[in-house]
Amino acid sequence: MAKVSLARRLQLAQRLETLAPGTPVFCGEARVGAVDGVYAEGKAEVAEYLAVRWDARDGMPVLIATKDVESLESRGVVLMGAEPSAYETAPRFDSKLYPSLRRLR
């Protein structure tokens, strides 16, 4: 995984705020799901988490930290992990389980 500067990470988080639900999510070349929502912690205005409807988990939303996003491309969101198996333990997302998260988009 490539290291990303703090300035680049902040710029990426600000761009993530504009993602529309349904935007495809990839690990390397493999499509793994679609964005279900973009979330911030508490009163933060910067995207900190994505809820992703994960295809291999029957479309169940999982929580992915924005620090795991490598890039935003025309095809969608690309995660740092090149293999979908890197996210097998990503927690299921249910807003009731994460009351401090606020939906940005």
Image: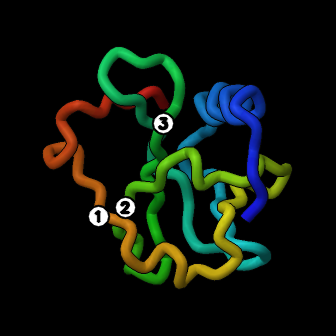
Disc 3 and disc 2: Cα gap in Å?
16 Å
Q: Quick one: SS at disc 2?
A: strand
43 or 95, which is in the foreground? Answer: 43
The amino acid on which the numbered mark 2 sits, given as a three-letter code, is Pro
Q: Which residue is mark 1?
A: 92
The amino acid on which the numbered mark 1 sits, given as a three-letter code, is Arg
Q: Position of residue 56 (x, y in %)?
A: 47, 83
83 or 94, which is in the foreground? Answer: 83
Q: Which residue is mark 2?
A: 61
Q: Nearer the viewer, mark 3 or mark 2?
A: 3
Disc 2 and disc 1: Cα gap in Å?
6 Å
Q: Tell me the quarter of the image containing the N terminus.
A: bottom right
Contact, mark 2 vs mark 1 (Cβ under 8 Å): yes
Residue drawn at 23 percent across, 52 percent down: 94
Q: Which residue is mark 3?
A: 48
Q: Quick one: SS at disc 1?
A: loop
Which badge, 3 or 2, is on the more N-terminal residue? 3
Which badge, 2 or 1, is on the more N-terminal residue? 2
Determine which quarter of the picture holds residue 53: bottom left
Contact, mark 3 vs mark 2 (Cβ under 8 Å): no
56 horizontally vs 12: left or right = left
The amino acid on which the numbered mark 3 sits, given as a three-letter code, is Glu
2 or 81, which is in the foreground? Answer: 2
Q: Is residue 63 above or below residue 67?
A: below
